[in-house]
Amino acid sequence: MKLIKQFTIIFSIYSIADIFSKTLKLPIPGNVIGMILLFILLMLGIVKENHIDEASDLLIANMSMLFIPGTLAIMDEYKYVKDEIIPFVIICVFMVVVIMAATGLSAQILEKLLSKLRK
């Protein structure tokens, strides 16, 4: 029952953000707005970590399964993308490196800021 409650919280936040994004015709996808909204709610203490911890752990543990539909769609539409496969792979590899670097640097900066605030 606790897991259902936690998934309800997560998906409610996502649904609200998705409706918000579509209603205002924002160029930002609803799931990105949902992550920002969830982050803000966690930072403000409106949603506590223990309200969503088990559902979050379950989603993270099974994250690889969430890539299967996208991968199958690319395989199904391969005939349309085969001429552009080399630039596509180069862009994907480049963006993985950029995202990893940005995430690492952001985490380091945030850790330094938090350690200064704690002192």
Image (spheres, helix red, strand yellow):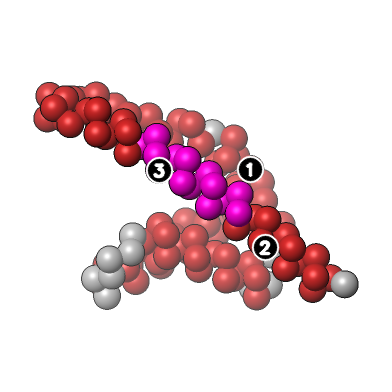
Element class at badge 3: helix
- Of 114 and 54, the residue lying toward us: 114
Label 3: which residue? 95
Left or right of residue 56: residue 116 = right
Q: Residue at x 87, y 72 (%)?
A: 119
70 inside magenta stretch: no
Residue 110's tag is 2
Left or right of residue 58: residue 86 = left
Q: Quick one: label 1 or label 2, which is nearer the N terminus? A: 1
Q: Residue at x 48, y 47 (%)?
A: 99
- Of 17 and 83, the residue lying toward us: 83
Q: Determine whether label 1 and label 3 are within 8 Å by CB.
A: no
Mark 3 Cα shell of 10 Å, populated few (<14), some (14-19), many (≥20) = few
98 inside magenta stretch: yes
Element class at badge 2: helix
**What is the C-alpha distance between the residues marked 3 and 2?**
22 Å
**What is the C-alpha distance between the residues marked 1 and 3?**
26 Å
Left or right of residue 95: residue 55 = right
Element class at badge 1: helix
Label 1: which residue? 57
Q: Quick one: label 1 or label 3, which is nearer the N terminus? A: 1
Vertical arrangement, residue 25 with respect to residue 51, above or below = below
Q: Position of residue 88 (x, y in %)?
A: 26, 34
Q: Position of residue 3 (x, y in %)?
A: 62, 47
Residue 72's tag is none
Q: Position of residue 111 (x, y in %)?
A: 72, 60
Amino acid type at circle 3 is: Met
Q: Quick one: label 3 or label 2, which is nearer the N terminus? A: 3
- The quadrant where residue 6 appears: bottom right
* Type of secondary structure dominating the magenta stretch: helix
Point out the stretch of residues depicted in magenta: 92-105
